[in-house]
Image: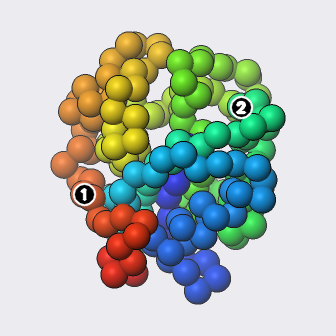
Amino acid sequence: MALGTNVAFGGASGGTLLARAAEALGPHGLIVRRRSSFWLSPAWPDPSDPPFVNACMAVAAPGLDPPGLLTVLHEVEAAFGRVRGRRNAPRTLDLDLIAWGDLIIEDGGGLEIPHPRLAGRAFVLAPLSEIVPGWRHPRTGESVEALLQAAADRDQVRRWGGWDDRSAWP
């Protein structure tokens, strides 16, 4: 799963907000297996909006299927003040189900796995490559490293510290 934020909520922002969101997954039965570093990226499509802090996590979701996990992610987003409105608008929390192993799903109801824009987003591919460097896109067979090298925004993202390096958090 991918996490992102560029708007403070409840007195927290950046890495602090992402850490709180990760903690909020536990009561839903999710188990965090691996976490990437934090990565900074400019807002898109309007780079004058606040920059994003991004990360990826590998989670176990006992008893949940992909639609069930997506429901949990939306519930956690809402608990952190996420209001769905204009696409790509600044937001307190963005939790995306980006992949489920090598599964391919298009359910027609809004769930598409792998995430339809995953392959072109360095702000997701860079942290994803940290936690599952051998992952391959199930549609194309391309490695996460090859996708990252081909991403147009790869020079606009930078590692920004980790979960335990709280001095780097705003």
Disc 2 to disc 1, C-alpha distance: 30 Å
Q: Could you tell me which residue is drawn at 54 percent across and 31 percent down?
A: 99
Q: Going by the image, does 74 lie left or right of 60?
A: right
Image coordinates of residue 111 in percent, x first then y, are 68, 30
Can residue 49 be seen in this snapshot? no
Q: Going by the image, does 165 lie left or right of 157?
A: right
110 and 19: which one is in front? 19
Q: Are dots 2 and 1 in contact, CB under 8 Å?
A: no
Image coordinates of residue 150 in percent, x first then y, are 23, 30
Q: Which quadrant is the N terminus positioned in?
A: top right
Image coordinates of residue 134 in percent, x first then y, are 35, 26
Q: Residues within 10 Å of mark 1 (few under 14, many from 20)?
A: some
The picture quadrant where one finds residue 53 is bottom left
Above/below status of 168 relative to 95: below
Residue type, mark 2 in image: Pro
Q: Going by the image, does 79 lie left or right of 104?
A: right
Q: How many circles with numbers are drawn on the protein?
A: 2
| Label 1 element class | strand
Residue type, mark 1 in image: Arg
| Residue that numbered label 1 is attached to | 158
Q: Name which of mark 2 and mark 1 comes first in the sequence.
A: 2
Image coordinates of residue 19 in percent, x first then y, are 54, 67
Q: Which quadrant is the C terminus positioned in?
A: bottom left
Residue 117 got which mark? none
| Label 2 element class | helix
Can residue 54 be seen in this snapshot? yes
Q: Could you tell me which residue is drawn at 59 percent across and 43 percent down?
A: 59
| Residue that numbered label 2 is attached to | 66
